[in-house]
């Protein structure tokens, strides 16, 4: 009977080194002379553990899997010749998640043990050993039936992590031996019924999102796209609309949209019945996240691995956050299913600070989309009108640039008189680079009708955008963007005035 590799209750590796040093010290004196006279022998080669085969079938030959856990929970999965699976658990039948079903079946087609630890465990193991092995009762019992009538039952115990190659203790029904089962297989087989449940996953395309909102116990935040998702400057047309209205930074909203795309449901918990919703804290939800996606077309990967267009309908997705399972996981209800979700994925959305998403660039209208700019100051009112004429080639086809966009001849008028396009282009480019100087103090009171400067931007796509400047202190102006003031700007920092000769 060979010695069984037992799981240590408490590992003390430092003691092993102490004994080793003492042993070496004792042996050193007696062996020194002999070692000097002898050629140093080569270190003996390590013999790898001998693996063994318990079952050897194609995955398609697995017909039935029954799993029982130490807790008493059990489930049964059957598979037909075509690979269609059905699970029975807790008095219910359902089609399992395909990936999880394939994982279980793939682990039971070819079954190997990592090493045989003892030939006859039942004749030598005492109750303490069996407790350490985790086989009374087993951590998990797995019974698999094959198409040819073959049947195999595995009793999987506890993990032994004290060895150089960790393993799980295992026995096989009808076999008194004790085996070592590799970590990967043991983990692939430790699948609960909930893990087999198919979980609804949101399909969110960032390019189609045009409204985002979340509401927590502290209040709500909302962002909207001021235009269409197909507008050429759609990325810069986002605005915060709750708790107040202000232009948002395209990059900040892009990051928020990315976090929404990454929102994935984890494990199945329960159906969203009234009893289960109350049980998991949805009667007083901690947060509600809502995403609206406009109708649109995106590229997807087809069965051949190529790119194909797919049309999507308008859709609104709602994620309700209930109580916390622990510090890392929340309960989330999505499409009438309660799931576990990573706390990091949820907080990446709900921890978004509205102020951090606001643009520090007051002018948000690109020159390529500008149709009319009106500037009103104490000195008067100037209206700049932009005209674009598409270039036509000799063959009467439009001239396109490298990106396939029609090339245009641009001109501008100031109060109806021709102005120098290059000068206007340069002055407008400077406007786009202007940034605010700081945030207005909390509780600051001001009136938009007291603005001494006002700029109104009208776009080719029909959007109007207004900026106003009013006195904040002797050196700064409060910046009003579409009727709301959040930031201040150094006086004279935002102005557009063409040289007189440029307007002649």
Image: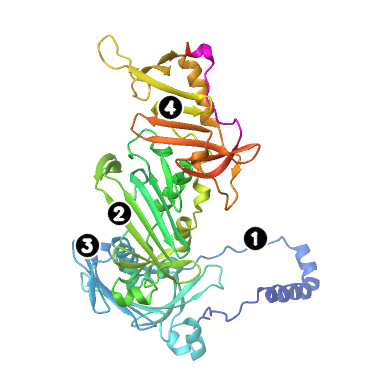
Residue position for label 4: 373
Q: CA distance from mark 1 to mark 4?
A: 87 Å
Q: Which residue is mark 1?
A: 42
Disc 2 to disc 3, C-alpha distance: 35 Å
Tell me the element at label 1.
loop
Asked if the magenta segment contains residue 98, the reply would be no
Lower sequence index among marks 1 and 4: 1
Q: Is residue 144 visible?
A: no
Residue sitting nearer the eye, 149 or 388: 388
Write the start and end of the magenta stretch as one range.
Answer: 491-502
Furthest residue toward top? 394
Q: Secondary structure at mark 3?
A: loop
Residue 80 position (above or below residue 445): below
Q: CA distance from mark 2 to mark 1?
A: 71 Å
Residue depth check, mark 2 versus mark 1: number of the one nearer the observer: 2
Q: Residue 4, how many percent across, how many down? A: 51, 80
Is 202 situated left or right of 486 in this image?
Answer: left
């Amino acid at each position: 009977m060979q010695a069984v590799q037992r799981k240590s209750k408490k590992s003390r590796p430092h003691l092993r080194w102490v004994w080793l040093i003492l042993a070496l010290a004792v042996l050193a004196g007696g062996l020194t002379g002999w070692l000097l006279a002898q050629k140093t022998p080569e270190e003996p080669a390590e013999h790898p553990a001998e693996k063994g085969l318990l079952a050897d079938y194609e995955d398609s030959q697995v017909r039935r899997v029954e799993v029982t856990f130490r807790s008493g929970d059990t489930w049964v999965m059957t598979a037909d010749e075509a690979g269609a699976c059905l699970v029975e658990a807790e008095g219910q039948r359902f089609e399992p998640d395909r990936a999880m079903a394939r994982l279980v079946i793939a682990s039971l087609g070819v079954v190997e043990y990592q090493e045989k630890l003892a030939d006859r465990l039942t004749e030598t193991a005492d109750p303490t050993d069996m407790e350490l092995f985790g086989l009374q009762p087993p951590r998990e019992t797995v019974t698999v039936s094959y198409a040819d009538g073959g049947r195999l039952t595995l009793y999987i115990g506890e993990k032994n992590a004290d060895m150089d190659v960790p393993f799980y203790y295992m026995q096989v029904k009808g076999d008194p031996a004790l085996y070592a089962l590799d970590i990967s297989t043991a983990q692939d087989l430790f699948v609960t019924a909930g893990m087999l449940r198919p979980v609804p996953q949101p399909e969110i395309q960032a390019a189609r999102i045009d409204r985002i909102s979340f509401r927590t116990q502290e209040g709500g935040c909302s962002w909207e796209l001021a235009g269409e998702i197909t507008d050429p400057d759609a990325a810069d047309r986002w605005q915060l609309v709750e708790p107040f209205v202000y232009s948002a930074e395209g990059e900040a909203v892009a990051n928020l949209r990315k976090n929404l795309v990454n929102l994935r449901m984890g494990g199945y918990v329960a159906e969203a019945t009234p009893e289960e919703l109350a049980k998991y804290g949805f009667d007083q939800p901690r947060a509600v996240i809502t995403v609206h996606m406009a109708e649109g077309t995106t590229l997807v990967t087809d069965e051949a691995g190529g790119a194909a267009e797919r049309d999507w309908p308008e859709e609104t997705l709602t994620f309700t956050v209930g109580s916390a399972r622990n510090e890392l996981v929340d309960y989330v209800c999505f499409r009438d299913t309660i799931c576990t979700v990573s706390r990091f994925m949820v907080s990446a959305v709900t921890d978004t600070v509205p102020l951090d998403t606001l643009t520090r660039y007051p002018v948000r209208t690109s020159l390529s989309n500008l149709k009319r700019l009106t500037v009103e100051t104490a000195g008067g009112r100037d209206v700049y009108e932009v005209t674009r004429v598409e270039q036509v080639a000799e063959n009467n086809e439009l001239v396109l640039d490298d990106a396939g966009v029609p090339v245009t001849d641009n001109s501008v008028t100031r109060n109806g008189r021709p102005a120098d396009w290059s000068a206007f282009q340069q002055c407008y480019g400077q406007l786009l680079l202007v940034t605010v100087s700081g945030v207005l103090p909390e509780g600051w009171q001001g009136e938009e009708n007291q603005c001494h400067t006002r700029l109104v931007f009208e776009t080719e796509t029909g959007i109007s955008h207004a900026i106003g400047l009013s006195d904040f202190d002797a050196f700064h102006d409060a910046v009003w963007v579409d009727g709301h003031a959040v930031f201040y700007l150094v006086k004279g920092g935002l102005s557009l005035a063409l040289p007189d000769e440029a307007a002649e």
